Image (cartoon, rainbow, N blue to C red):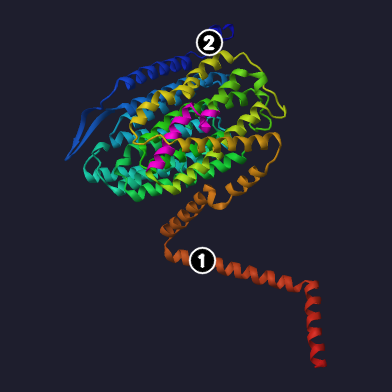
């Protein structure tokens, strides 16, 4: 117990008073909202009229139900842990308070998105997430950070444009409150396309691995419970207005995202990108659950995933920070001997990620798979089952490389473990216990019978993926990595191909609208003349070379000789 005394915590309080105060405040809020969730059985809507414009009334609505209370409680818990971890990771940063204020703005945007069912304030929260995420990604102001930030911002602006169109549709229908929306397929399609950009679903998934240029505390926050889950959360809220064909589109995009990200994680050696690709694959799993008309089960997996994914990011980030900022898995090793606390925490979070029994991820994944059996969607059922060994492969491959490895670079011990303990402990408990705490509530919302044979198949496939990862790490048999890398970088699996194609198409359309059709025709003729002139010039040069002259002369001589003989 002497190791985890409060002396160093008080010292950090003096040095980082503002981040620690905010961290403690968010933790206190998380406890309050969680108790409100446990006591809430009803939904409450508070409306305050702000402005009347002809027949349209602008009201400030505040909607509270058990979903919003649980989500915001988990969000505050993760923010509290991330702010504590930022005091370690960004110890020598001169602008730590600025980072804290950006995180607070980020949380305020999520607050608007969660509790305000008014589409105008929902758009404010949506835009706020895009702007603050851009500021967090470019925090280091390096060239790679600027490139990743611009890519993140521009792709998310595509989703913002869809939401602006949705706002126009709301005004056209004469209401603002999202609870007043009836079956409107066009509005549902616009919302789904906007949510695809925020949740990094195919074909907008390329920005999420690029956002790894941000500080690791940002990755722990953005890639677990805020930006990427905002799109999933809105799809859960609006799922009642989606038609059947839109559920099919969500399912196909989610399944494509699940497999492409899983295969990319299986062959990636960058530690942070492996965790980012695992986030992408789990987001695909949530989209598939929504497509199967299981929005509450998808929300259950969103909550459990937020806990253990934030824990993995903090563990990997602390390891990277104390290893000279090396991110290659082949240099991050020897963790078990240098930091047993971090090793146990990483093992627990990885087991929860792969769905090991009685950890948090097991309960939510079990409900998705068993509900899928009851729905009898055979194609999605088989694809989800086949994806299980991929998840267990890349999660245990990350674990085996970090714990064992070849000792190229050992972790240096520091005196920050007291602060690390207080930043990991809430997430550690959540990764173990939040699944069994929430399972009875979500199980009562599903109409299924326990499927025992499915549990056996799932365990077999999970252990099969663990065996493959152990075989590749210890025996250096990289056949599976070669196969997955070959598949994952094929053009259809690479979302950058689709983004570039879309960008080129938009550039051509903009040129056509800006310059006119005649200018486009003249430009094409000019390019054709230039290319034909270049072809004629290269042909003349080629046939003027001595070797070609001898070749042509020889052919003509053979032809003349043949004619003379005949």
What residue is shown at x 46% (from left), y 41% (from top)? Answer: 284
- What is the secondary structure assignment of the residue under circle 2? helix
- Give x and y (percent) for residue 322: 64, 22
* Residue at far left of view: 55
Q: Is residue 280 visible?
A: no
- Mark 2, mark 1: which one is toward the viewer? 2
Say whether residue 148 is left or right of residue 253. Answer: right
Q: State the quadrant of the C terminus.
A: bottom right
Q: Is residue 365 magenta?
A: yes
Residue in front for this viewpoint, 202 or 40: 40
Q: Is residue 310 magenta?
A: no
Q: Is residue 322 visible?
A: yes
- What is the secondary structure assignment of the residue under circle 1? helix
The span shown in magenta is 350-374
User: Where on the picture, by quarter, is residue 540?
Assistant: bottom right
Name the main secondary structure of what is drawn in magenta: helix
Q: Is residue 553 above or below residue 512?
A: below
**Few, some or many C-alpha atoms within 10 Å of disc 1 (few <14, some 14-19, many ≥20)?**
few
Q: State the quadrant of the N terminus.
A: top right
- Give x and y (percent) for residue 347: 57, 25
Q: Which residue is mark 1?
A: 524
Q: CA distance from mark 2 to mark 1?
A: 68 Å
Q: Which residue is mark 2?
A: 9
């Amino acid at each position: 117990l002497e190791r985890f005394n409060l002396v160093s915590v008080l010292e950090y309080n003096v040095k980082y008073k503002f981040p620690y105060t905010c961290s403690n405040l968010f933790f206190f809020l998380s406890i309050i909202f969680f108790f409100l969730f446990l006591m809430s059985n009803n939904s409450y809507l508070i409306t305050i009229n702000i402005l009347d414009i002809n027949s349209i009334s602008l009201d400030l609505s505040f909607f509270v139900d058990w979903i919003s209370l649980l989500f915001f409680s988990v969000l505050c818990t993760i923010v509290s842990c991330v702010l504590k971890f930022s005091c370690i990771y960004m110890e020598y940063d001169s602008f730590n308070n600025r980072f804290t204020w950006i995180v607070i703005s980020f949380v305020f945007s999520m607050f608007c998105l969660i509790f305000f069912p008014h589409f105008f304030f929902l758009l404010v929260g949506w835009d706020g997430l895009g702007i603050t995420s851009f500021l967090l990604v470019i925090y280091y102001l390096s060239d790679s950070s600027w490139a990743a930030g611009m890519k993140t911002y521009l792709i998310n602006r595509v989703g913002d444009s869809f939401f602006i169109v949705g706002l126009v549709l709301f005004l056209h229908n004469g209401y603002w409150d999202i609870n007043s929306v009836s079956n409107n397929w066009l509005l549902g399609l616009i919302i789904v396309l906007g949510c695809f950009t925020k949740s990094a679903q195919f074909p907008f998934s390329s920005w999420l691995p690029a956002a790894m240029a941000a500080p690791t505390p940002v990755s722990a926050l953005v890639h677990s419970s805020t930006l990427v889950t905002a799109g999933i959360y809105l799809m859960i809220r609006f799922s009642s207005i989606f038609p059947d064909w839109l559920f099919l589109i969500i399912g196909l995009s989610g399944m494509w995202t699940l497999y492409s990200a899983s295969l990319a994680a299986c062959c990636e050696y960058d530690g942070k990108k492996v965790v980012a690709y695992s986030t992408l694959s789990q987001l695909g799993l949530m989209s598939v659950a929504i497509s199967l008309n299981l929005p509450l089960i998808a929300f259950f997996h969103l909550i459990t995933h937020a806990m253990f994914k934030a824990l993995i990011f903090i563990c990997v980030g602390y390891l990277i920070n104390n290893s000279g900022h090396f991110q290659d898995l082949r240099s991050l090793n020897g963790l078990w001997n240098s930091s047993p606390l971090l090793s146990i925490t990483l093992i627990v979070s990885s087991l929860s990620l792969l769905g090991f029994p009685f950890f948090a991820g097991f309960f939510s994944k079990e409900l998705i798979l068993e509900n899928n059996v009851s729905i009898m969607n055979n194609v999605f059922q088989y694809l989800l089952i086949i994806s299980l060994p991929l998840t267990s492969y890349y999660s245990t491959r990350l674990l085996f490389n970090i714990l064992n490895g070849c000792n190229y670079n050992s972790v240096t011990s520091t005196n920050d473990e007291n602060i690390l303990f207080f930043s990991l402990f809430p997430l550690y408990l959540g990764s173990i216990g939040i699944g069994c705490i929430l399972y009875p509530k979500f199980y009562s919302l599903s109409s299924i019978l326990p499927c025992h044979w499915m549990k056996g198949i799932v365990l077999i496939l999970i252990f099969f993926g663990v065996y493959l990862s152990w075989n590749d790490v210890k025996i250096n048999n990289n056949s599976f990595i070669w196969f997955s890398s070959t598949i994952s970088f094929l053009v259809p699996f690479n979302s950058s191909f689709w983004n570039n194609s879309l960008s080129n198409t938009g550039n051509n359309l903009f040129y056509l609208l800006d310059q006119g059709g005649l200018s486009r025709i003249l430009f094409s003729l000019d390019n054709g003349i230039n290319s034909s002139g270049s072809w004629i010039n290269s042909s003349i040069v080629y046939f003027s070379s001595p070797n070609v002259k001898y070749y042509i002369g020889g052919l003509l001589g053979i032809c003349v000789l043949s004619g003379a003989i005949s």
